[in-house]
Amino acid sequence: MVFVDTWAWIALAVRDDQHHEAVKRQQAEFVAAGQRYVTTDYVVAELITQLYRLTGASKAETFVGALLAAIEAGTYRIERVSSQRFTAAWELRRNTLTSQRFPLLISHRSLRCATWAFRTCSPATDTSNR
């Protein structure tokens, strides 16, 4: 499972983004390897805001509509950030992840590894807080 953060979605959505081609190639590799994408409702909310700003309403609505349809179809997985998960992520971030890096997501800085953002500290595969 591959966690996809906001900037990776943006790079996929915006053809003139400097990372668009690299992220498309990485996506093709993940698909070929049978990897499944997971993201969060926080990431999708941030994506919507950024796409409206970067591409305008029509393109933003088209991309987000396709993303939400893929989530509904089970192609991608979305994790909801509950108050319990938020608190657990905050504690995990404060107590154990001060300087560690994890190869769990693609982002605009590094296609294979980036520092966890606060909202992604809570393991996406943890289903105990749903």
Image: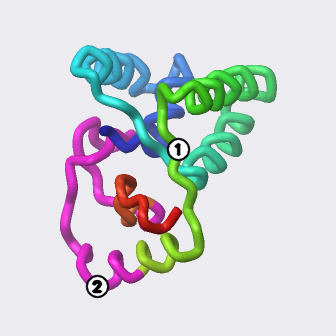
Residue 32 found in image quarter:
top left
Upstream in sequence: badge 2 or badge 1: 1
Q: Is residue 88 above or below residue 31?
A: below
**Spot occupied by residue 113 in the image (x, y as percentages of width and height):** 23, 46
Q: Residue at x 21, y 48 (%)?
A: 103
Question: Would you say 85 lies left or right of 50 here?
Answer: left
Rounded to the nearest angstrom, the CA distance separating label 2 from label 1 is: 26 Å
Q: Is residue 46 above or below residue 83?
A: above
Question: Would you say 97 lies left or right of 54 here?
Answer: left
Badge 2, how many Cα within 10 Å: few under 14, some, many 20+? Answer: few
Q: Amino acid at mark 2?
A: Asn
Q: Residue at x 27, y 47 (%)?
A: 104
> Which residue position is annotated with label 1?
78
**Spot occupied by residue 82 in the image (x, y as percentages of width and height):** 58, 67
Residues shaded magenta: 91-119
Main secondary structure along the magenta-highlighted residues: loop
> Which residue position is annotated with label 2?
95
Residue 101 found in image quarter:
bottom left
Closest to the camera, between mark 2 and mark 1, is: 1
**Spot occupied by residue 56 in the image (x, y as percentages of width and height):** 77, 28
Q: Is residue 106 magenta?
A: yes
- Closer to the camera in the image, 49 or 18: 49
Q: Residue at x 47, y 63 (%)?
A: 119
Q: Is residue 120 magenta?
A: no
Quarter that holds the N terminus: top left
Q: Residue at x 32, y 19 (%)?
A: 31
- Closer to the camera in the image, 33 or 48: 33
Q: Is residue 109 above or below residue 20?
A: below
**Spot occupied by residue 33 in the image (x, y as percentages of width and height):** 22, 20
CB atoms of marks 2 and 1 within 8 Å: no
Q: Which mark is residue 9?
A: none
Badge 1 marks a residue whose secondary structure is strand
